[in-house]
Image (cartoon, rainbow, N blue to C red):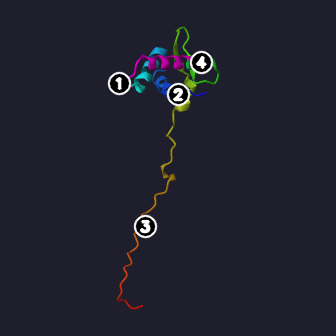
Amino acid sequence: MNNAYYNQLIELLTYKPEGMKVCNIARCIYNSHCTLFDDGHLYRQIHSTVRQYLWKQSKLKNSPFKSVSNQWGVYAIKKSFVAQLELCFDNWEYDVIEKRKPQPAPAPQMLNLFDSI
């Protein structure tokens, strides 16, 4: 079950491995979605959505999110999930893609009415 803010949650919690409070997570997401004329209703909606989603996901075994022990309302991302996000380019073979040589453009054929066939 993905949330509308799932990608932003992963991004925020990846940069803070010790965890973040729900209010700080909601504030970061609100700042990326708000406009000049938004009221506080959008923030309350984002906060409640994020809080409920993280609480439910932290209870699941295969979820990337976990609740930080001894701290109420603080969530982090599991280290095993972060390891899956890291891409290793050490053994990348650059010679796999063959470069094509540009083919010369064909000479233009001009029609002449006075040429004999």
Q: Are marks 2 and 4 in contact (CB under 8 Å)?
A: no
Mark nearest the camera among 2 and 1 is 1
Where's the C terminus, which quadrant? bottom left
Q: Is residue 19 visible?
A: no
Sequence-first tag of 1 and 4: 1
At mark 3, the secondary structure is loop
Mark 1: give few (<14), some (14-19) or many (20+) Cα within 10 Å.
few
| Residue corresponding to mark 2 | 4
Where's the N terminus, which quadrant? top right
| Residue corresponding to mark 3 | 103
Mark nearest the camera among 3 and 1 is 1
Mark nearest the camera among 1 and 4 is 1
Give the residue type that dot 1 points to.
Leu
Residue visible at 51% across and 33% down in the picture = 86
| Residue corresponding to mark 4 | 58
Residue visible at 37% across and 81% down in the picture = 111
Give the residue type that dot 4 points to.
Ser
Mark nearest the camera among 3 and 2 is 2
Badge count: 4
